Every structure is written in C-alpha cells, then in structure tokens.
Amino acid sequence: MRRKWFYLALSALALSALVLAQGRYQIGTPLNEQEVQEWNIRPSILANGIGLPPGQGTVDEGAKVYATHCAGCHGSSGEGGAFTRLVSEPFPITKETDSVDFAIGNYWQYATTLFDYTRRAMPFATPGILSNDEVYAVVAYILYQNGVIDESEPMNAQTLPRVQMPARALLELDPGTQKRFPWLKLP
Amino acid sequence: MNRRKLLQLLSKGAAAGAFVKLSGGLAQSKIPQGATESMKVLGATLREYGERSEFEKDVIRYISPNLRSRHTGADFAPLEKLEGVITPSSLHFERHHGGVPNVNPADYRLVIHGMVERPLMFTLQDLKRFPSVTRTYFIECAGNGQNGYRNPPDMTLTATRSRGLVSNSSWTGVPLSILLKEAGLKEGARWLIPEGQDAAAYTRSLPLEKALDDVLVAYAQNGEAIRPEQGYPVRLVVPGWEGSIQVKWLRRIQVTDTPVMSKDETSEYTDVMADGKIYAFTWVMDPESIITYPSGLQQIQRGFHEIRGLAWSGHGRIRRVEISLDGGKSWKQASLEPAPDALSVVRFKYNWVWDGKETVIMSRAWDEKGNTQPTQEEFFAKWARNNRYHYNAIQAWRIGADGKVVNGDKTLAGAPAQLGAVGRGGCGGES
C-alpha cells in the first residue's frame, strides 16, 4: 500500500519538471524556530524530561494549587470524587484491583506524564490556566500524596525526570508490537 | 406441552380470530389508510441540505445515562439499526477527551516540526492541493466490547452496547508520508507526536514506519467535510489501529526519536494481562464480529430470517465469518458483502429458518492472517478480568422459545466484575 501511494505521488510529480527536480511539491509555508514555538503552546514533555520548562514547585505550594483547582473533581486529597481517583491503593495493582482504583501511585509509569498531562489538559474546564510553577507544585503534591516523593523534594526540570514510578516495573511492550517494530524500546 | 394445554391454546386462538373478524367487518382493508395520501398533495420543496425522514428519528447514537460528563467519554453507533457497511457520518461513534472544538477552517493550520529539515505550516487548502487518496477504513475504540468485562453478563445488552464503538467510513486525505517527505525527515527520526486542537490538546506517539505505510491526513468523510465530532477539519486515520491514536482536529506533528508516553498511552489505553503485566502500545485491533440481527432485546418469530452482522480486523482483510446456531458446537460459513477490503468492515449474512426452539447463536470472524476471535474463557486466559480494552471474545445471543433475544454470554467462575461505576473516565462509554 505504501508503494502504491508512492507511485501515485510519483506520477503526479512527473507533471512538473521543476517539482520533480526537487522531489517535493513545494506546498506549505516554512517556519523558523521562533514561529514553531509560537504555535507550540503546550509543548510535549518526553519521558527523558526534554520539553520541561524552567520553574519549580513544592509540595506545600502544590497543596494550595490542588485545593483551588483540582479538589472539586478529584476529592479533597486525591481520593477521587466526581472524576478520576488520583491517589492510589498501595502499589502494585493486581488482577483483583478494581480498575476504578487504578491511580497515579499504582498505575502511572512515568512522572513526566503527570506534568505533560496536567499542563496540557487540566483543569478540565479551563485548561492552560496554571503557570509552570503551579504545575510543578501540583505535580509534587500529587506525587507526595501517592508516597512517591519526599515532602521536602521540590519538582523542577532536573528532579522530575529522575522520579521513578513504581508501576514502571510492570510495564512491557506488547509482544505483537515488539515483533513488528524490533527497534522499539520503552523509555 | 400436553394435549390439554394445546387444546386450550387453540380454542383461545380461535376466539381471538373470531373477534378480529367481527370488529373488522365494517371497513377492513389490507391497504393502510394513509398509504395514498401523499399522491393527492404536493410534496416538500427542494432543500439545500438533506435530512432523513422524520420517521427515522429514533435511529440515534446510544449515550449511557451513567456518564458523568458529556464532554468526555464515548457514545455508540446504533449497529442493529443500520444496513450495509458504511456508517452514516451523523451516527459514527464519538469519543472525546475535552469536548468537540469548533474549528474555523480559515484559521486552521497544521505544523510539522521537530526532527525535520524544514518545519512547515499547511493551510487546509494546502493539504487539499496534494495528491489525494480515498479508502474505506473502520475506526474502532480500544474500549469497544468493554461490556464483555462484566460478570455476570449484562442481560440488557444490545448489539449497539456490545460493539457500537466501531464505525466504517470512506476517508479522503493526503498520505502523511507525502507531508513528511515535504518537510524532510532528519537522520534518527523514529516517532511522530500528533496533537489535537481540542481542550485536552490530545497527543499520542505514532511510530514513523506506520506513518510512512498507510496513515492518512484526512479532510473528508463519506464524500463531504469530516464532521466536527470526527475531527473537522483534519484528522489522522491510522488504519487498523485503535481509534485513540487517530488524533482528531490535528494541529501539530512533532517528529522525534522517542515516544512521549502521554497520559493516553500510559494510564489509559494500556492493558492489564492475566499474568499481571501491563502492556503498552497494544495498537492493532484484533478481529471482531457481531450479529446485529437477531440481537439483544430484539424479538423474532418462527420462519425465515437472514442473520446479519458486521466483521472487521485490524490485521487485514476478513477472510471468512462463521455462524453457530447451536451455542458453538458447530459452525457454518456466512456469505460476505461486499468483497472484503483490508482494514474495513464487511457485512456477513446467513439464511436461517428458526423452528421456534430455544437456541444460542454466535459469529466469529477470521482474518487473512489466520487470526480469529476467542471464546470468553480463551480471552480471559490472556487478558486480566480488570483490564478495560481490546475485548474481542465471541458474542452470543440467546433466542428464547418466545422469540425474545438476550445476551447469551456465559457467567464466568470467579469474582463478579462491573465496569467502574464512579471515578473513572470510560472509553467503553458506560462507566
């Protein structure tokens, strides 16, 4: 199928000697790095920490952010309310754990995901309103509530990628996916 | 039934028949009274955008009353009320994470950046200038079939609530491979991180190899612009893979050498296995089939029936679909229509005369790679009971002697299981 499209594309290319010479259609507007940044309003945070912004937040600060922006849906200390439970039953989850009890401390495998998702999509009805410091702080608070980090440990671009989530030990690549993409490794 | 009961029934029937004869004696006609009225008056005028008949208004998506928000969650295509293989765009199942954004195409842009020679921005018109491809593909939520995790089975299950998180459309767009070539891939590029323009700025990780194979940047669905709830104006179509990776309202693609491990490929859309492991990147949708007629909560009578249903597989073409009329003891081959396309829904049909005896009917699909559907027991030997996705075990329907059709799945040994009633978003759409 890939080949078919390639030849389709190729036959269209042949219509223009100029385009053919370059191997491209010359459609689209080039952007410089600054223009890309302007468009990239919620940059992805990779598991190795690439993409984390400057800033910092502590567990104490996070408790305040949480009470203001999160507790309404997730319960006063992350036990779950109208929406998802954030603070878990003890790790690990087992075959007997009800899936409603899958939460950050027993199921989330990467601490960076917590920053990425919180900044990207939370608070649910007003995404994007938290500052980077506030996101770091609430991430610290939630990790602390789950027993993953110490109360005194602030979260920033250096500390967060080093946080080991217990559930990472359970995560494996789907064997069918591994067979098809032998090079693929989970971070 | 003993002879005495039979005689009683017969006499009741005779009495009822006599009543009908008497009361209908005056103006009884086999022709419905309203049948010719429309031939005496002018009909409706031309109109610029068509609507279905007012008498079809009950053919709607199923939205679970248990959802805590209609801004996130899913609703189901009404499978047993549809014919053929194309899902009408208005009835395509929905799954959103932050509501349906209202995107003005004049402001729409797609940016490809990261490990590319030339970061590029495309307008909608730009995308439409490239060579186009039109293909029919199914899109299926990884949570389709989630009601099958209930134990004991839900006796009010319908075909819609069993497998309605799948839909099948004709998609038109530009191959993503062409756009990537336009931007020029840098050495070491392995992954794409597509992002949506919704309130969740939804992202996933897509391996470059799949993108270069058959992924479409689609702008049309069934011949017109994609519906807002399906990603207007532009979405990814990732044939055969779970719906959640087919990012809607596509605004940005970052080319990287590593996956992002976003929320929806770690805390959700990962699978708990029977051995306690959690699998990541379970992208391909295994074969599925569902009998849509006769199916849960329908009522049939003795005599001829065309058993109908739908089958599809993320591994390729459907090769055959088998029907069992005796609870899985024996299997017969159904006919397929149209000729199966790869990664697309096919309809299966089987002529059957029901003798009025209670029975359990089932279907199972086989794809061209030799994959088929497991029984419930086989399924749970591999996947954990508390998993949430990729349920594809054979669905059984029990037909009672009274012609009523209900869920025919078995109650399994072990702990009862419900779908999460509170506290959890459900791509299965019901929690």
Image (cartoon, grey):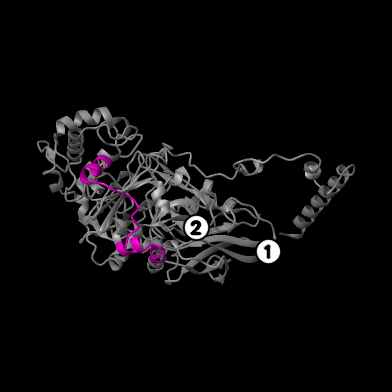
Residue B120, placed above or below residue B359: above
**Are both tags, 1 and 2, on one chain?**
yes
Kind of residue at disc 1: Asp
* Label ID, residue B355: 1
- For the N terminus of chain A, give its image quadrant: bottom left
Along the viewing direction, whichever of A78 and B182 lies nearer the viewer = B182
Q: Secondary structure at mark 2?
A: loop
Residue located at (53% from left, 70% from top): B329
* Label ID, residue B4: none
Q: Quadrant of residue A12?
A: bottom left
Would you say residue B427 is visible in this rendering? no
Whole-percent x, y for residue B331 in the image: 55, 71
Disc 1/disc 2 C-alpha distance (Å): 22 Å
Q: Quadrant of residue B286?
A: bottom left
Residue A143, placed above or below residue A174: above
Q: Residue furthest front?
A: A17
- Residue labelled with disc 2: B409
